[in-house]
Image (spheres, grey):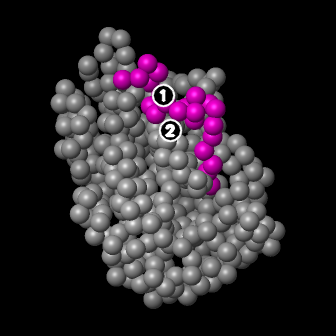
Amino acid sequence: MKATYKKHVLEFKRAAGTSRGVLLTKEAWYIILKDDHSYGIGECGLLRGLSIDDRSDYEAKLSWVCDHIDQGVDRLYSQLTDFPSIQIGLETAFKSFASSDPFQLFPSAFSKGKEAVPINGLIWMGDSGFMKEQISEKLKQGFQCIKMKIGAIDFSSEMELLRNIRREFSATEIELRVDANGAFKPAHALEKLKQLSELELHSIEQPIKAGQWTEMAALCEKTPLPIALDEELIGVSTSEEKIKMLNAIQPQFIILKPSFIGGFQGSDDWISKAEERGIGWWITSALESNVGLNAISQYTFTKNSKLPQGLGTGSLYTNNIQSPLEVANGTIAYNANAAWDLSPLKLTY
């Protein structure tokens, strides 16, 4: 078996605004396994500026993994603690290689096209007109759960956008989530949470910046609105660290981005520890191409969560990998009659 890696730069259809800045492109890295009879592909979901493995030696580590692929997935995985996005690429590539269909990674009713996964519709940051336009679009597309990124424009304008939704749709008709990406100052966060709670929101993701455990714990204790930790999980890799963090903060939810937290093994560990403590969770993609989104979606279905998941990012790019993944009526599904097209990667072996 031979291993190689490949880089592909994804281009956003429209600039994607977050509280950390505006995204125009996104790197995608792939591990490709091949022998005389089979091939496998796995995406390493690196996100510059946020992934813990956004490092100058990233490509060198990918090269090292390919050079030592004969060590096998388990041994290599254990040596990649500081590179969680390579861990999931490795896990996916080996699952892909071992399957008779390289894109059937977690065979299920989802991967066979018989069942779908409910997802939230994502509203990107921008001026109020742009955000209002996105909200209308998502509602027309049949989403029953909408997630709005906040923290880039003034808070009063964001509140008014949310009020407009609530004037038209009750909490039983449309579930609303907001994601602050750490934009609130600890001194002002609780007051903003109180105002947001008046709109009967489902939850808020990462209201203050990660790493402020004492302040976040106080917020989780006093909040009138459930808090979901997101960036807080990045870089917390050992079982001891996970237990310490969950016990210290005691959040209402955690959000799992497998590309940031050690892939499927890492996600399983977080889920186990959260459920032991009565903490809810859901899974979110991290702007992967359809190769990574497919792996995460198939994995997510097997976890049997009843909450809408964050898996609706496949249509963001002009040059994504064509896949059987389809978003419709607030769900993501796998069309078993559609085909994959890897030609944008221009793979050579």
- Residue 170 found in image quarter: bottom right
Horizontally, residue 136 falls left or right of residue 202, namely: right
Q: Amino acid at mark 2?
A: Gln
- Above-or-below relation of 223 to 299: below
Label placed on residue 298: 2
Q: Are marks 2 and 1 in contact (CB under 8 Å)?
A: yes
Q: Indicate the position of residue 160 as horizontal and vertical percent values.
A: 71, 77
* Sequence order check, earlier mark of 2 and 1: 1
Q: Dot 1: few (<14), some (14–19), or many (≥20) neighbours within 10 Å?
A: some
Task: Classify mark 2: helix, strand or loop.
Answer: helix
Camera-side residue of 95 and 343: 95
Task: Classify mark 1: helix, strand or loop.
Answer: loop
Quarter occupied by the N terminus: top left
* Magenta region includes residue 140: no
Q: Indicate the position of residue 115 as horizontal and vertical percent values.
A: 63, 37
Camera-side residue of 303 and 322: 303
Q: Amino acid at mark 1?
A: Gln
Horizontally, residue 126 falls left or right of residue 248, namely: right
Camera-side residue of 74 and 146: 74
- Above-or-below relation of 339 to 51: above
Q: Indicate the position of residue 267 as horizontal and vertical percent values.
A: 38, 51
Q: What residue is rendered at 24% in x and 52% in y?
A: 82
Q: What residue is rendered at 54% in x and 73% in y?
A: 226
- Above-or-below relation of 60 to 216: above
- Residue under label 1, please give it: 104
Q: What residue is rendered at 26% in x and 59% in y?
A: 239
Determine if residue 293 is in view. no
Q: How many marks?
A: 2
Please report the bounds of the magenta region as a residue range: 98-120
Determine if residue 59 is in view. yes
